[in-house]
Image (cartoon, rainbow, N blue to C red):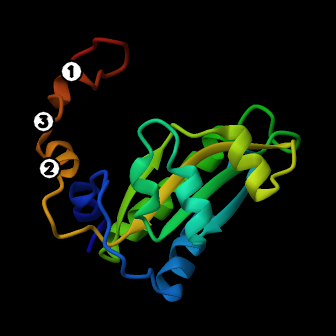
Amino acid sequence: MNVIDAISARYSVRAYDSTPVPKSVLDKMLLSARLAPSAMNYQPWHFIIVTDNDKRVKMSKARYAGFLKEAPVVIVGCGDTKRAPKWHVVDVTIALQNMVMTATAEGLGTCWIGSFDEKLIRDMLKIPERWAIVALLAVGYPRKKFDLAGLIARSKSRKDMSSIVSHNEFGGAK
């Protein structure tokens, strides 16, 4: 699958089957994150791979995160606020997006999670204070059963290119 195919195929999956994610695929995802660009090449990221069912169930209690208990893997993306105080969020986000594209190319579904109980996750996963929790990423094989949220996400239209791109100045035409 080429990059544009992966970008076009990706959607937010909120229903997962119980098939475990192979270690080789997780390793590819983590490699793609490690290869991401970062400001000053600081690489201010740390990723916690959560496969423990009890921990995923606890994470799923947050608003809009109920499906985390189904996802066989939840990746917690953390940014080093001391090493990269201004850019850790951007850098971790770029690395997570590399993971998303790699997962899509490997036939997995993902969903970004911004709704989480930071204190619960920080305490449960023993994340030091200097590390900000930037986002969670649910990972797994999409459930074949009807997934209304996924269907809605896939059917959303995209803005016309002319409404999101300018040339040489804001609002400038080609």
Q: Is residue 28 left or right of residue 48?
A: left
* Crowd rating for badge 1 (residues with CA inside 10 Å; few <14, some 14–19, many 20+): few
Return the mark for residue 151. 2
Q: Is residue 73 above or below residue 173?
A: below
**Quarter of the image with the N terminus in it:** bottom left
Q: Which mark sits nearer the N-terminus, 2 or 3? A: 2
Tell which circle, 3 or 1, labels the residue nearer the N-terminal end.
3
Tell me the number on the disc at residue 163.
1
Of pointers 2 and 1, the one earlier in the residue sequence: 2
Q: Is residue 169 left or right of residue 28?
A: left
Judge whether residue 142 can be spotted in this image. yes
Q: CA distance from mark 2 to mark 3?
A: 12 Å
Q: Is residue 37 visible?
A: no
The residue type indicated by label 3 comes to Ser
Front disc: 3 or 1? 3
Spot occupied by residue 143 in the image (x, y as percentages of width and height): 24, 68
